[in-house]
Image (spheres, coloured by chain):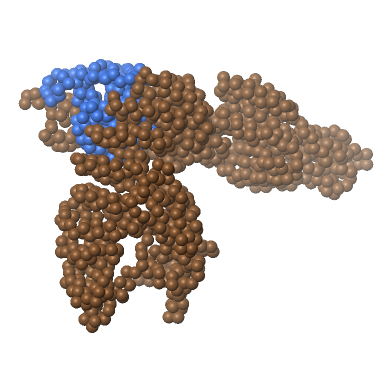
Chain colours: A blue, B brown
Amino acid sequence: FTLPVDRVGFFGSPSLSTFDISEDTQQQIIRETFHLVSKRDENVCNFLEGGLLIGGSDNKLIYRHYATLYFVFCVDSSESELGILDLIQVFVETLDKCFENVCELDLIFHVDKVHNILAEMVMGGMVLETNMNEIVTQIDAQNKLEKSEAGLAGAPARAVSAVKNMNLPEIPRNINIGDISIKVPNLPSFK
Amino acid sequence: MALKMVKGSIDRMFDKNLQDLVRGIRNHKEDEAKYISQCIDEIKQELKQDNIAVKANAVCKLTYLQMLGYDISWAAFNIIEVMSASKFTFKRIGYLAASQCFHEGTDVIMLTTNQIRKDLSSPSQYDTGVALTGLSCFVTPDLARDLANDIMTLMSHTKPYIRKKAVLIMYKVFLKYPESLRPAFPRLKEKLEDPDPGVQSAAVNVICELARRNPKNYLSLAPLFFKLMTSSTNNWVLIKIIKLFGALTPLEPRLGKKLIEPLTNLIHSHLGSLGARMRLVLPAPRSSGSGCRPGLALCVQAPKPVRALKYLGLLAMSKILRTHPKSVQAHKDLVLQCLDDKDESIRLRALDLLYGMVSKKNLVEIVKKLMSHVDKAEGTTYRDELLTKIIDICSQCNYQHITNFQWYISVLVELTRLEGTRHGHLIAAQMLDVAIRVKAIRKFAVSQMSALLDSAHLVASSTQRNGICEVLYAAAWICGEFSEHLQEPHQTLEAMLRPKVTTLPGHIQAVYVQNVVKLYASILQQKEQAAEPEAAQDVTQLMVDRLPQFVQSADLEVQERASCILQLVKHIQKLQAKDVPVAEEVSALFAGELNPVAPKAQKKVPVPEGLDLDAWINEPPSDSESEDEKPKAIFHEEEPRPAKPRQPEADEEELARRREARKQEQANNPFYIKSSPSPQKRYQDMPGVEHIPVVQIDLSVPLKVPGKYLLEKDRKKKKKKDKEKKGKPRRHSSLHTESDEDIAPAQQVDIVTEEMPENALPSDEDDKDPNDPYRALDIDLDKPLADSEKLPVQKHRNTDTSKSPEKEDVPIVEKKVKKPKKKEKKHREKEREKREKGKEQKEVRPRLFPATWGLPLRLPCHVCSSAWLTGPASQATCLLSRPSLCHSLQGTTGRKSLTVNPDLVGLFQKSSKHRKKKHKKEKEERSKDKKKSKKKKPPSDEAAEPVENGALDEDPLPVRGTSLASHGPETYDIQGSLQKDSQVTVSVVLENQSSSFLKSMELNVLDSLNTKLARPEGSSVHDGVPVPFQLPPGISNEAQFVFTIQSIVMAQKLKGTLSFIAKNDEGSTHEKLDFKLHFSCTSYLVTTPCYSDAFAKLLESGDLSMSSIKVDGISMSFQNLLAKICFHHHFSGKRWGVALNACAVGEKSVSVDGKCSDSTLLSNVLEEMRATLAKC
């Protein structure tokens, strides 16, 4: 029933919903998950049996690997494994639409937006919406609302942050942008 | 450098936003912790500012830090502040932070309740949505309880976006607040047919989750889901539904058959896409069993191309395995191949499958294969998994697949070569179990174990690798216990006394010490029998020499045992020196056999008859006593508190007697034996066959049989006993499949089943985990809702302001009510019509149910069905609408007639504008005795005046409490009308039945504390109120008097007098007439029509107390009865509510349930009701 979602990159952003866990355990889960997932071959299956760490044998890790990013979902037996794989696909495609060609940096710098998108798909550990168009519509509407609220007052702040970005050309230093064109593999479409 | 300065200055000018924070962290790779603590300080500063935008920014950054693993719970209050911002932008940040860092233990969470409620009812759908999303992450039982109703309302929001979120979050609410499930379920069910696919899928999702845990409660939904399955095109929904059916079919076998066809259709229609097919097949096997066999073959082939599918295929197979092992066994080779797969997940799956696939034939082969994998396996987790699987496979079902235990023991011994496994204790347990239960194997086992003890590698590696040395525990024990089988006991003894042993963990050493003595005892015996006293003394000397090393052990257990045994051995040495044969006595220490005991045995010991475990053994001390003792105990700690009076000291004789009795009891109790060291001896004392202990059952059962389950064994226990008596071991017929029979057992082995007490019930209820959170959701959903189950609502009495929605409809209903004898069919038709209408006009629907209520005894079932069609609302409606049925019964002496109050229509029309009243049945009493006291004129027999309904029309709030005062010439009908909140108008109809002319009438009442007559200003309490008219003979007129009521919860009787001057031909006389005014509680009641919603909410709110009465022996038809009881719905005078609900129970009894905010009022009302009913 729970679908706590970890995304593991070199930053982890779990939105674990049901574990009442301390920040430490959370970090440990992310580390171990990353450890488990990253050492797996490219051509093995996308499922990992759950250990004690993620709440017992009923839970599985289901992941997909996009360039430098791993998207890992932890689900219990009530979810269909392939369904979740599709959900990850939908998630990535949605990110792609919302960020207009998503790249790793987008996810790093706009964690909040990623969360918001995820919140439209998964709520309290349960799959809420799987229709990408619907999700994108809602996100756009919310962003519009946000912009209208910010109005003129928001403009200088945006300008400043743009300036900041220009001032610091060294940011992408250690990120290999070349890799990040996310390939969208052709899985049998879910919808 | 310059760049940094620029950046710094900008930072000072503008607060850092999230992007800056991320950037900063990335730029400070080497001193990240320091940088972040600096940032947190900044954030703290920002949080102190008033500007909400700054705060929101800070909270946003905190959320990111939380993700990195920093504790931000200190900012919980600020998060709430941001949550309550009016702008969506900030609100969203706040809720996001909350959903990340709030959990059940967060104490500020209760502060959010009202904020969330506000957001839930916000006009902006995104405010609501964001609140729902947040809430779903941190809902607590309290929040769930308080907000359940708000969320319920949102489930029928106009926006599908909100609806689907509300539906989904209900699952969380159910989990935290299971009481909400039943009230909310009907609406949830409605959502299954929601036009929006998102909402529909959310509803399916929720119900599937619920049904997964407690499927049996959702069987009734099967047809609905069946329809959905055949019509839906959404794969998510389909998968969920199929999963749901998977859970349902075991409970309802017919469902499986029905499902086969649509499922195969689905499979075929998805043939094009393997993936989709697999998804569907996966959950299906359980549901349709044989139906999916054809699909199964495909499953197995499917794994080849795609890894994911291979995995899923194996998963599916393991599910099929449970129901159709045969069909899976055919694919054994394929599965074994999968073991070679490089993907660990797939290997693990395959292992799971193997567990179910083994048979006697292939066990050895499979285990051999696994063993080879054990050697190859690189990761310890996988190797451990392999090891446990091997043991599981072999030991499953009481070792039913093992034909050769020698082989098994060697496998186990081989496994001990594994280094670094965590499962040493598992192997040890297996060894012990096998050695104890399989007698024939003991000799072999002992030889293997002694070899183990001899081999140094286990001891050597024990210090570093603590896992596997557990095996030594078993080895030592087996060698000691079955020492008679040892080839070279002396050598083993030496091995066990090696100094290295002291490096082992304490509990193993302890076992060593204990078993050394056993070994010693058997050696001693051997030597003595062989008449080698020298050798015996050598052994003793060895013991005396080596034992001190254990005495010095740091482990207490080891120390204790060793020192005790050392003394014993020294004593033996002395005896040996005197050439006293001691071997007999020493081995007597360990006589008898230990038997395995089933883990559940203790629980299953039946309680002997007449034993009350809850009874006090001694009288509990009286309260006063213990109170006296308590303070004492504080000061005199050494004095034990006498919870029970101390047993008088038993004298020697008494003790001996008791001991004897206990012995006797133990001997009679077969279960006691296990713990006693030498059972045989005791048996010898015990005459009588009935004392043959169960423990002694050792049937030489051939190996084919051992696969006996414990429960089966229980059933056969008696048989076994018989057999034992006859001393003829009998072969059981084989329980296994033919295929197994051709394997000849390698040796005749009997497996002693674990001990279970007699009479043990073959129940497995103890398997349930009482802490399972889902158990709370195991609720029967088909029962109609009880009033007490409504969701709590936080509301301030808005019921009063509700208006009745559709005036036009009401009269129609009323007309129907007037003809309750119409055929039921018609009623139902109309009802249906009404319901349809109701759908168009939401508000109307609830009000239309009264039609149903016109039907006499059909009611209960009807109500159930309708209630469930429309949910709590309609349930409430039924209650609500009943008042409209109020017939006024106008009784006269000796005659009861049922008349429909023609006034109701009018009333209802009015009621649409104001709240209205309804009245009570009038009680017409005639106090004839009073008349007699007057005696002037014979009591008149005329009927009481029917209530003047016209008066009701004029008066919006009449309550008619009738009481009566009858005086010879006059009939006084008193009608109470409630006009204002605390006033009752009593209308008195005065009729002059005499021939006198009555004038100067004055009415006076003895005021009570509660009820006072409203008198003209300036008059004293003793003055009467003049009646403003005179009465000629035969004329009646009505006078109204106003009473002020303090409390309505009690019935009142007021005594009063009417004084008047009767003037006739003979002159005029001053006369007085005494009467009593009876104010019944029910007469205070006023009906207030209100919306069903409001009414439902009112009922849901926990602040109404409830009680009910049941009256038996009613001979009247329910119809009449219903007429007789008028239902009082809502009393608006004070802010109290009464709701009554009656239903016929059985033929002759009626039960009335009431709900009211004031329990006294309620009980009084019900009491009056009972009195009325009793008269029927």
**Is residue B648 in view from this perspective?**
no
Q: Answer above or below: position of A181 versus B131.
A: above
Residue drawn where x is 28% and y is 19% of the image: A186
Measuring from the top left, give residue B442's x and y in whole percent: 31, 59
User: Is residue B465 found left or right of B85 in the rendered image?
Assistant: left
**Quadrant into which the N terminus of chain B falls:** top left
Question: Which image quadrant is residue B458 in?
Answer: bottom left
Q: Answer above or below: position of B756 versus A70.
A: below
Residue drawn where x is 71% and y is 43% of the image: B1148
Question: Which image quadrant is residue A148 in?
Answer: top left
Measuring from the top left, give residue B941's x and y in whole percent: 86, 39
Measuring from the top left, give residue A15's x and y in whole percent: 30, 32
Measuring from the top left, give residue B345's x and y in whole percent: 27, 34
Q: Answer above or below: position of B591 versus B803.
A: below
Front in this rendered view, residue B362 or B1059: B362
User: Is residue B163 found left or right of B106 in the rendered image?
Assistant: right
